[in-house]
Amino acid sequence: MTTGGTDMRELGRRLSNWGRWGPDDERGTTNLITPERIAAAASLIRTGAVYELGIPLDADGPQPGGNRINPIRLMAENGQEQVLPGGFKWADDYVFMPLQAGSQYDALCHVHYDGQLYNGHPGDGVTVKGADKCGIQTQSNGIAGRGVLLDVARARGVPWLESGSVITPEELDAVAAGQGVEVGPGDILLIRTGYRAKFLEERDPAAFMAGEPGLGLACAQWLRERDVAVVGSDNWAVEVLPGENPGALFELHMILIRDMGMTLAELLDFEELAVACAGDGVYDFFYAGPPLQFTRGVGSPINPLAIR
């Protein structure tokens, strides 16, 4: 399956979920994470081993500056000058950061085109005060359920895929078959490109952000056919960059978020999880990754957990 020159807007119309959960829906494909599917996913907790998938929120992150920076944490109080009854001392700190500076979700208001957000909500509803529709708070009851890791880098036998390397639907099928796992409705699908390992070895934010391996445009139909609820990766945009169409930017973002209503998880760390999955051949697990309730926010930092 290839894009074959398919127009992005035509593909988006064909894969659209607009109206599927009603004309006022703001949650999109996370509607597929039903109570029954969450309960079934709980049975995937076999040993209780927990794997953190979020990256550290500190000055050593992958953001080189410009539009997004790494988090800046400042101390408001450290207790050193406090003289309080009984010797009590306290410390407080606060943080300044883009909501998408580290491991994070893209809200469904993060991307729009032709004047419309997901489900036909107006694009001009995103103002300097935030988004009046499809804000990240609409996902605040949590994103949890069956997680599936597809380890593309391991399947290719490389530590990481090179920038610009396209992952196709055929490759996703082959990786899933090789791992003995099926991707199905309501799943939180995680794609390992190894790009987090690249950053940890090279520590070069500019090179990390200059491009990336990732999903090709044809994967949108693959995800729609399987009714995937959320797709995430260890790169910073899920899709391959530079993109397959030199005349456009972030076409997969536009289809997944704006047309299909799919939440994206970015800048995750699968290195420890991937070793564990390869060790026992089990690539599904319970995933728990709620966003923070930033009202009208277009994204949220996350520290999701894979529990096996």
Image (tube, grey):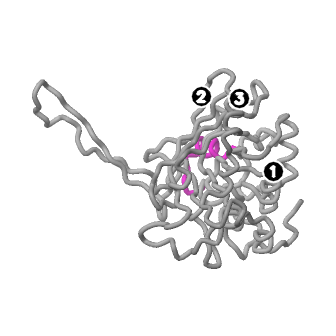
SS of the residue under disc 2:
strand
Give neighbour class at mark 3: few <14, some 14-19, many 20+ (Cα, 10 Å). some
The residues tagged by marks 2 and 1 sit, at their Cα atoms, a distance apart of 27 Å
Q: Give the mark, 1 or 3, whose residue is nearer the N terminus.
A: 3
The residues tagged by marks 2 and 3 sit, at their Cα atoms, a distance apart of 12 Å
Q: Is residue 174 magenta?
A: no
Looking at the image, residue 257 sits to the left or right of residue 13; the answer is: left
* Residue picked out by circle 2: 50
Q: How many marks?
A: 3
SS of the residue under disc 1:
helix
* Residue picked out by circle 1: 226
Q: Give the mark, 2 or 1, whose residue is nearer the N terminus.
A: 2
Give neighbour class at mark 1: few <14, some 14-19, many 20+ (Cα, 10 Å). some
Q: Position of residue 269 (x, y in %)?
A: 61, 41
- Residue at point 81% right, 59% down? 221
Q: Position of residue 10 (x, y in %)?
A: 80, 74
* Residue picked out by circle 3: 44
SS of the residue under disc 3:
loop
- Residue at point 81% right, 40% down? 155
Looking at the image, residue 198 sits to the left or right of residue 217; the answer is: left
Q: Position of residue 198 (x, y in %)?
A: 64, 45
Predominant SS along the magenta part: helix
Which amino acid, mark 2? Val
| Numbered range of the magenta stretch | 194-207
Which amino acid, mark 3? Leu
